Amino acid sequence: MSFALPLVLWGAVVGALAVTALHFLSVRRPPLLLLPTTRFLAGGDSRAVSRATRPSDVLLLLFRVIALLTAGAALAGPRWDRRDASGVRFIVADRAWHTDSSALLARVRTSASTSVERAAADYIVWSDTISPDGRLGGMRADLASAFPLALRAVARSVRGMRDADSVSLVIVAPPGGTATADAWSAWRRAWPGMVQVVDFTPTGSRRARGAAPAVLETDAIDADDAVMSAYALRDVHASGARSATDTSTRLVRMLRTHRLTDSTRAAGAVTVLWPEAGVPAGWQAASDSVGAVAARGVTLVSPMVRRARVTATVLRNARPIAWWSDGEVAALERPHGAGCVREVGIDAGTGDLLLNESARGLLDAVIAPCGEERWPVSSTVLAAQTARQPRATAAQLRAGTSRDAASHPRWLAPLLLALAIGLLVAETVVRRRAVDDDTSIPTSVRA
Amino acid sequence: MTSYGPLLDALRGVRWPARRAVAAALPGAHRSRQRGTSGEFTEYRAYRQGDDPKQLDWKLLGRSDRAFVRLTDDRAIVGTWLVVDGSASMDFPARASDGRLCKWQVACAVAVGLTAVANASHDPVGLAATSGAGVTRLAARARRGTIGDVARALDALACGGAAPLTPLVDVMPPSVRVVIITDFLGDVDALQRTVAQRTAAGAIVECVHVVAADELDPPAGVYLARDPESSTVERLLNRRALAAYQSRFAAFRAETARRVRAAGAGYTEIRTDAPLSRLVRQIVAGQGRDSSRDARSANGASG
């Protein structure tokens, strides 16, 4: 049995506990004292309240507790779950795989961990690849968009899920899909149960624009430039012959010697200002040492010389992307038109500082697409994070998406309510009989 | 019979003069309103036509050529009536409980002590007492055995009922001293009116208010208090109700004292936990609390 409004039932349970506690407070007549000056005492109830080790009037207590619980259950929208009730699975997938749905379902079913999930009825929710304004949309743009799609689908299907006892969510992640960390966290909290992320690579799929590889366009004079060498080691190469119509790659202009001007800025793309010598415009020259720099959750630990400090003016309208170990900003991003400009105050020097594996966070943050911080989805990591929670119960989703508190079957709530009323009537009769039988209490002091 | 020996020994030599001059009667110890027959000179008064020439001080007339009459005060006895309240409320606290005296026992002892003191002045002493068996009267006598008669009569009584004292006081002659020993928890309003009437008629009325220590400070704990004279009056006695109770009881005692004194009668409040001989001396000396102290204590308790 489940309840559409379990809070009402919990309220009834609290009420029943309170009633039980009251039965441990014994209202008794205290010992008699013949006092000639009784007339000078204030009038009122001549009974005293004291704690008892055993509940008084057990029969009345039973009537009251059962009546409260029954009434609470009736008002909480009880649903009698059938024995053959099963789970429902919502699968959110990219609409591009619509034609390959059988393979997608097979992939999801093979990834199911329990027999209950294998038997679950499947609802496939298709996510549009291209948004109405022509941009990349849906799960291709951000995997977190699967949550609102799933919640909307649950809200639409909630009446049809009356016999379901649990609901699970499977997000089919496209290869190279990314998610906005904040959006993912926020929407994840909205889904009450377990979420499973499954990677799926259909035949002939192409890499999405959002995850296009970066191509560096640099003005570095030195062929052994430390920054460019580091990127080359990470398979991000410079390309001086990239055509303007090439959509398979993403342009990142790396300014090592030139200052930022309209002619040096890459329109609609990422422009990185990482001077070989000196400091970025507006930064304050400095000369001290720090021990680490952190970006995208990866910390590069190494003795470094800090030659530039940000100022309040520089930080205005800018978003930090890397931090020194003492909390100061080491690199920032400033939006500009459709693109952005990144200023890096880290002296790369001529050594192998950036060749370290721990420098990947800094290097990726510097050439990442403009906008919020994103991190590539690792389906295994997400699955490990999300599989700790149990499956969402249907009641949880009904409570969150619908106010339909009707009982199922419909006669269940009226039956429980009638039972509660009957118990209350019986309680009244028993209570009056108990008071009439109590001859120790004079008529004048009976409540 | 209860042994009153120690009490009577402690009261030996105590005298109880009337608070004001008494009416003419047989010669006794109290100052009388009648003048002229005794040999104790008091004062001179100028001769007026009609005075008995035998009362003229002839020697003074011879020395000063002025006619004066010698005046002398008479002494007389005064009959003393003890009116003792034996209603159920006087049987508190219960008798023979840890050696403490109940109000009735204290009232009996005080009555016997006052009988002894009055009898020492050759005053006739009578007794009128209520009890569960009705009203008991003992005629006023001045003989030596009166103390024993009073003691035996009181010992034979048991507290009970709620008989009013007013009918007993109403029939008292106007030329006697009436001592009312009660807790004022019965017909208090009617009794105060009767006291005022008897005082106006010339009687000397002394009211002795018996208060139990347990009434002033009831036992701690939670009890269902019941009035022994009215089983329908039941109230809860606990720590919270105690302060209001004490305040109201103090106000009642103060108001009773004020009204009794305003009627011209004497008022003495005695506690059951005080020594009996001291209580009798307190009554004889008229050392009851004065009205101003009563009013102050009542205001303090109610505030």
Image (cartoon, helix red, strand yellow):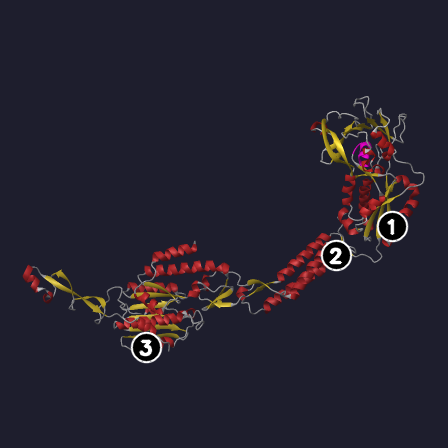
Name the image quarter holding the N terminus of chain B. Answer: bottom left
Q: What is the number of the mark on residue A413?
A: 2
Picture coordinates of residue A322, whole percent (x, y): 76, 34
The residue to which callout 1 is attached is A112
Q: Amino acid at mark 2?
A: Ala
Which of the marked residues, 2 or 1, is nearer the chain's N terminus?
1
Q: CA distance from mark 3 to mark 2?
A: 87 Å
Say few, some or many: other residues with alpha carbon within 10 Å of mark 3 (under 14 / 14 to 19 / 20 or more): some
Any part of residue B234 in sight:
yes
Which sits in the foreground, B34 or A224?
A224
**Does dot 2 land on a helix, a strand or a loop?**
helix
Label 2: chain letter: A
**Does dot 3 land on a helix, a strand or a loop?**
helix
Label 3: chain letter: B
Q: Is residue A210 magenta?
A: no
Residue bounds of the magenta highlight: A360-371
Seen in the image, is B185 located left or right of residue A436? left
Labels 3 and 1 positioned on one and the same chain: no
Which picture quadrant has residue A353?
top right
